[in-house]
Amino acid sequence: MSTSSTGAVAKARTDIQAESGASAILTFLRRWGTILVIILFGVFFSLMSPYFGTVSNFNNILFSMIVSALLSMGLTYVVAAGSFDLSIGAVVTTTSIITALLIPSIGWIGATAVGLGAACLIGAINGMLVTYGRLSGIVTTLGVMFLLGGVNTYLSGGYQIPVDYNEAVFRFLGQGRVGPIAFPVIILVAVFVCGYILSTRSKAGHYIGAVGDNPMAAYYSGISVYRWVIVSFILSALFSGIGGVLLTSISSSAQPVGGQGYLLEAFAAVFLGATILGKGKPHVLGTLLGVFFLYMVSSGMNMIGISFATRQLFNGFVLLAAVGANAALNREEIHLKFI
């Protein structure tokens, strides 16, 4: 073999090794990049504030993110099914108001059941309008959001609805503690475990994901596409309803606009969570970590004196960055969804 041929072979081997190394780094960043960002932010705020890395602050973060985490985990199912739900904040308020109104007459257990039942009904209506009604998920749930806003104002009269102080068991749901752990955090963990099992170990979770990946392929595979889209909306509303019940218990009242402000956080968490572990698809574990990241950063910014407006800007930036990263993880797919 000539010297030139040997040099060419050596150069080819070097190029292959370089490409292999770059591919390994890219694979690592795809899988663990978001986790590394979360860790780096945590280290940064711990260095900037001596109070950030404490157990007390960790508990405060978990407690403050409870309602947002529930909404976001529910929204994950709808986004995984290929649609959107803009009514989740209004569902929180509706469930909260119904629960607070009915507690004096039928007790907290009955009131909670009726409130969650109403939430599931709203989710079913959203799902049927999107499927059998052939309406856009964005337009449908935006309209339902406005309708619920009117219903909530009518039911509450525009004023908060207090929960009687004697409802000790109901208040324990949102205000109680088991040792150093707030009881709502325990509820959040229990709901997460159920949601995680549902999405990863059940027929419903696999079918919802299949519908979101390719509805036509799912249809020709014998999957009832409409049914599972409706189920995803019901799950979204149910998780939001649980958040509404806990919000009522935490504040010992129902606010006519109690669910406002959670929508942006929920979408940011879902799309940020889709980049965690390099999945590129919405998943419940990623969503929960996404919510934790948003609230961790908000807590850190607050401790070092960054304004609320800046924190809102950061949330918007995270949403755009997460959607961009999610698109990059799925760049091999043909982009055909424009709604």
Image (tube, helix red, strand yellow):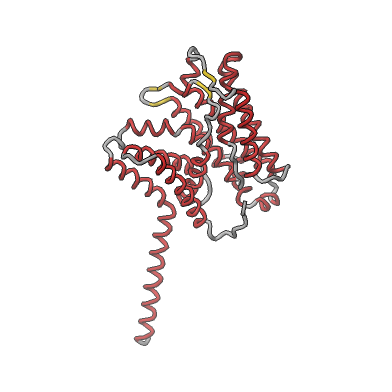
Q: Using the rendered view, name the quadrant where residue 307 is placed.
A: top left
| Residue 20 drawn above or below residue 238 | below
* Position in image of residue 220 (x %, y %): 70, 51
| Residue 144 drawn above or below residue 2 | above
In the image, 203 versus 180, the foreground residue is 180
Q: Residue furthest top?
A: 166
In the image, 174 versus 261, the foreground residue is 261
Q: Looking at the image, how many numbered discs can be counted on the residues?
A: 0
* Position in image of residue 169 (x %, y %): 49, 16
Q: Quadrant of the N terminus?
A: bottom left
Residue 242 visible from this viewpoint: no
Q: Residue furthest right?
A: 132
| Residue 32 drawn above or below residue 166 | below
Describe residue 292's horizontal placement relative to residue 87 as left or right. left
The residue sitting at 50% across, 36% down in the picture is 261
The residue sitting at 33% across, 30% down in the picture is 56
* Position in image of residue 258 (x %, y %): 52, 29
